[in-house]
Amino acid sequence: MARPRQPSSGRIEASQRAVAILDALADAGEVGTNEPLASIESALQRFPADEIVVATPPLDEQGWLEHGIVRDIRARTELPVTHVLPGGERNQAAAARR
């Protein structure tokens, strides 16, 4: 009978980092649902925000959820919306339409 494989140290470290990140996000505020528009609208009812910052994957890697999300958020709020891509870069077209 084969012994179960032990997780690699890299896998353990990644799991620990993920837990720490989720804990930090929970401590900083809240983690919303998988419906970004509903999460934003709910948060704005409890939190007087000055701006909405949306972080998405690179434009060429976005899935159905991310496509058009910045446009949809802008259509539903009067707040400035900043679209941030990996590496801290902003989507210049989205930032120009704020």
Image (tube, rainbow, N blue to C red):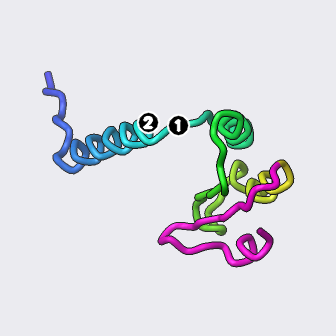
Vertical side of 93 occupied by 13: above or below? above
User: Of 40 and 5, which appears nearest the observer?
Assistant: 40
Q: Secondary structure at mark 1?
A: loop
Q: Secondary structure at mark 2?
A: helix
Whether the residues at callouts 1 and 2 have beta carbons within 8 Å, the answer is yes
Label 1 crowd bin: few (<14), some (14–19), many (20+), radius 10 Å: few
Mark 1 and mark 2: span between their CA atoms?
6 Å
- Where's residue 39, x and y in %? 67, 37
Amino acid on which disc 2 is placed: Ala
Q: Is residue 97 magenta?
A: yes
Label 2 crowd bin: few (<14), some (14–19), many (20+), radius 10 Å: few
Residue 8 appears in which quarter of the rendering?
top left
Vertical side of 12 occupied by 71: above or below? below
Earlier in the chain: of badge 1 and badge 2, it is 2
Q: Is residue 72 left or right of residue 45?
A: right
- Where's residue 84, x and y in %? 59, 66
Which numbered circle lies on residue 26?
2
Q: Residue visible at 86% across and 54% down?
A: 75
Residues shaded magenta: 77-98
Which numbered circle lies on residue 31?
1
Residue 52 appears in which quarter of the rendering?
bottom right
Q: Residue visible at 63% across and 57% down?
A: 54
Residue 42 appears in which quarter of the rendering?
top right
User: Of 64 and 70, which appears nearest the observer?
Assistant: 70
Q: Is residue 85 left or right of residue 9?
A: right
